[in-house]
Amino acid sequence: QYGADMTRSMIIPNSVDWKRFESVSHNRKPCHAPWQLAVIGRVVPVKGIIEAIECARKLADMGLDFELNIIGPENEVPCYAALCREKVAYFGLENHVFFRSSMPPEKALEGIDLLLLTSQSEAMPLVVLEAMAASVPVVAHDVGNVADLLGSNSRSETINSPAGFIAPSGANQRNPTPGE
């Protein structure tokens, strides 16, 4: 359409093979606990893992029953990974925050109720596309193209909110009822 030589071009839709995520089980039941939250990515400063742990502290202080699974390698910046573990201990979150090793994304998303994207910088995060393919809702910082990926109708939804925004995602999109 824009004049590219089609003999030298290939279209790769969103770089996600959505069929890999068809079998992901999401037994979402109202009022089930503990809620399964996840951050999927390298344990490095730019991914905002400490910010996710601070969010977990607020949830725990509110008395919510949840587990935050931090899924990804810790070997890239070992001192940061150690700091993250120290924060968990300092806040007394050992029964809420769990460090999991890397695994295929379809396995990592299985049973997750909500994906957190706490990254400080992103362009088009693959993990958000994978969560959408697996029908897992996403809470994200307003970085890069994330608002557009999650179907935000307006950038103003995120500009005034330090925590970002929640958008329906995946095949099971629906409009929440008031108070939900």
Image (cartoon, helix red, strand yellow):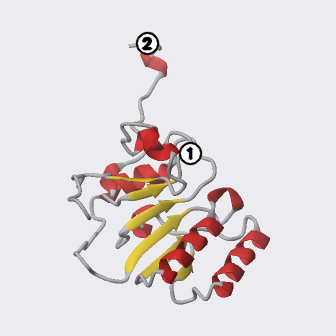
In front here: 171 or 118? 118
Q: CA distance from mark 2 to mark 1?
A: 28 Å
Q: Up-down: is 169 above or below 94?
A: above
Tell me where residue 25 appears, x and y as whole percent: 28, 69
Q: Residue furthest top?
A: 3
Mark drawn on residue 143 = 1
Q: Up-down: is 146 above or below 1?
A: below
Badge 1 crowding class, 10 Å Cα cut-off, few under 14, some 14 to 19, many 20 or more, is some
Tell me where residue 74 appears, x and y as whole percent: 67, 71
Is label 2 in a helix, a strand or a loop? loop
Residue found at x 26% / y 79% = 31
Tell me where residue 60 appears, x and y as whole percent: 50, 82
Residue found at x 24% / y 52% = 173
In front here: 35 or 10? 35
Q: Residue furthest right?
A: 79
| Screen quadrant of the N terminus | top left
In front here: 63 or 125? 63
Q: Which residue is mark 2?
A: 2
Q: Residue 70 lies in what quarter of the image? A: bottom right
Specify whether 113 is left or right of 144.
left
* Disc nearest the viewer among 2 and 1: 1
Is label 1 in a helix, a strand or a loop? loop
Q: Amino acid at mark 2?
A: Tyr
Residue found at x 34% / y 56% = 20
Q: Amino acid at mark 1?
A: Val
Tell me where residue 87 appears, x and y as whole percent: 68, 79
Specify whether 28 is left or right of 126.
left
